[in-house]
Image: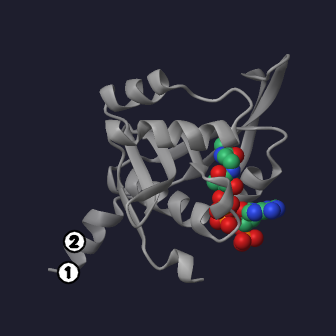
Amino acid sequence: MNDIVEINYDYLEEKDIDTVVAIEEESNPVPWTVKNFKDCLEKGYYSLTLKEGKKVIGFAILSVSIEESHLLNIGLTSSKRGQGLGKELLEKIVIAAEVMGSKKIFLEVRISNEIAIDLYKTKGFKEIGLRKNYYRLKEGREDAILMSKTLKKGILSQSFLSSR
Ligand SMILES: CC(C)(COP(=O)(O)OP(=O)(O)OC[C@H]1O[C@@H](n2cnc3c(N)ncnc32)[C@H](O)[C@@H]1OP(=O)(O)O)[C@@H](O)C(=O)NCCC(=O)NCCS
């Protein structure tokens, strides 16, 4: 467990994009590109990195609005998976959406991605639909499961108010 001592979070910056693309290439049959990540930064999406010391080992991208947030992508470098870090990163993202006032968080996940589906269910996401042929594969397409989680209302303002 020594290797999780220096884990910290940061905002995704342009200088991190090559590393994040490399993680994405380990994770996704049709990975996001440098341009996809740059577009997220330009659009102001809430974009986190998970770092071990200064090394980026994971990322998550959230599009936020008052009504609903959308988890657009999350990934961890393969050697760091299965140690609870993905769950921690997801928890951070859910809290961020709550703090920013979203009522719900949505995501899509490949129907074959049992580990991620399991993770989302563990964190209280429910399956609410199927998007046929949503994802590209190297050949053909794959369905997505649409999942959502209702968020706690204004946890930041509640704790802020109760501390007065
Ligand atoms: C999905 C991902 C972020 C999960 O992160 P992780 O650090 O590997 O997962 P954790 O160790 O935090 O485990 C969290 C939960 O995921 C599930 N999980 C993790 N590894 C699993 C495995 N080998 N088999 C089944 N479920 C698994 C479990 O529900 C686990 O909860 P538990 O420990 O209470 O049983 C990571 O595996 C990853 O980057 N995968 C590739 C990218 C990807 O699929 N992203 C999702 C796009 S929708």
Q: Residues within 10 Å of mark 2 (few under 14, many from 20)?
A: few
Q: Quadrant of the C terminus?
A: bottom left
Answer yes or no: is residue 123 visible. no
Q: Residue 66 appears at what percent x and percent y?
A: 36, 40
| Residue at the disc numbered 2 | 160
**Residue at left 43%, top 52%?**
49
Q: Is residue 54 left or right of residue 34?
A: left
- Do callouts 1 and 2 mark residues in contact (Cβ within 8 Å)? yes
Answer with the quarter of the image where residue 108 lies: top right
Q: Residue 114 appears at what percent x and percent y?
A: 82, 50
Q: Is residue 32 above or below residue 127?
A: above
Q: Is residue 145 left or right of residue 65?
A: right
Q: Amino acid at mark 2?
A: Phe
Q: Is residue 130 above or below residue 57?
A: above
SS at circle 2: helix
**Residue at left 22%, top 71%?**
160
**Residue at left 54%, top 58%?**
90
Answer yes or no: is residue 32 visible. yes
Query: For residue 163, which numbered disc appears in the image?
Result: 1
Q: Is residue 70 above or below residue 136?
A: below
Q: Is residue 4 above or below residue 123?
A: below
SS at circle 1: loop
